[in-house]
Image (cartoon, helix red, strand yellow):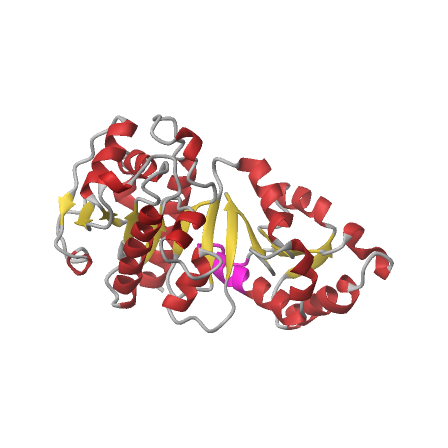
Amino acid sequence: MTQPKLPVVALTLGDPAGIGPELIARLLARPETTRSANVVLVGDPWLWAEGQRIAGVQVATEPQPSLAAVRGRADRTRPAFVAMDTVAESQVQRSQAQAAGGASVLKVLNACMDAAQRGEIDAICFAPLNKHAMKQGGLKHEDELHHFAEYLGVSGYFCEFNTLGELWTSRVSSHIPLKDAAGYLSKDRVKDAARLIYRSLQASGMARPRVAVAAFNPHGGDGGTCGREEVEIIKPAVRELNAEGLPIAGPFPADTIFLKAQAGEYQAIVTMYHDQGQIAIKLMGFSKGVTVQGGLPIPITTPAHGTAYDIAGQGRADANAMSNAFQIACRMGAAGLND
């Protein structure tokens, strides 16, 4: 039997002032990491050395001159390392959101996306970044997902997925004021969010995932007496998805649907706005959750938690979510190779 091809997965160190370098060091110290992919670490050598020092580990890497050289290397038992000089150690103050750190993150991620577009890597998994630092450093969008989408030329629907084990969530609206969330609701956006998470779950290894759609209003709108969005937008969207042959159910009141998902009835929930799904997922497993950048031409994943400035440099960071993000990147990257 032919063995599945291993994807080339790029790892980045994240915000240099946060816990990212430590997380990557802990991840790469695990022997199983290099069995899942042809791993390449991309970033500043001094920052990689600092991450290992904080984590209390030493990880042997194989220097490579470029990302283009990684796929053809013979020995994949060690992570490859492509060095970039993006920020000086003197420019970084630990636990502070700074322009230099944000610019560093953008430079590394852009280099990885360039490589992905050239077919040199199959997936990207990045350690936590800080949006404020990135905006100081040149980010012109509300978040990194919109930067990725523009950089990669995405014209269709895209959104963040938050995952916890086998449970995934998508959003109809994301980083916008709550007062604007109702205005983002439409049949097309509900259908796009449901289709996208269904297909992405298939790409991650689920043959026929069961997807539920959350209601927007309290009690699911109470038949239209507590809001009309369910009657006029969400239910018609679900009916049209069912007519396409997709096993999409709902809408269900948002305060109970996560109980059904937790019991295994559904593998995905389409939420209507950011905190509707985020609060539940983070309560269920803050240290394990993963964000998947949905709708992009390449898999990009990251831990759902942030840079944890409060514990940066203390050697206390938990790498479980980083490991989960890496494994999802490996599965999705391999799916593209072995279709």
Find residue 252 and report its horizontal and vertical position in percent. 73, 53
**Viewer-proximal residue among 98 and 45:** 98
Residue at 27% x, 43% y is: 35
Residue 157 colored in magenta in the image: no
Residue at 40% x, 42% y is: 97
Quadrant of the image occupied by residue 333: bottom left
Residue 220 appears in view = yes
Residue 7 appears in view = no
Residue at 37% x, 67% y is: 151
Residue 202 colored in magenta in the image: yes
**Viewer-proximal residue among 253 and 181:** 181
Count of marks, rendered view:
0
Magenta highlight range:
196-208
Quadrant of the image occupied by residue 110: bottom left
**Viewer-proximal residue among 286 and 109:** 109
Quarter of the image where the N terminus is located: bottom left
**Viewer-proximal residue among 264 and 173:** 173
Residue at 38% x, 26% y is: 316
Find residue 242 and report its horizontal and vertical position in percent. 66, 68
Quadrant of the image occupied by residue 203: bottom left
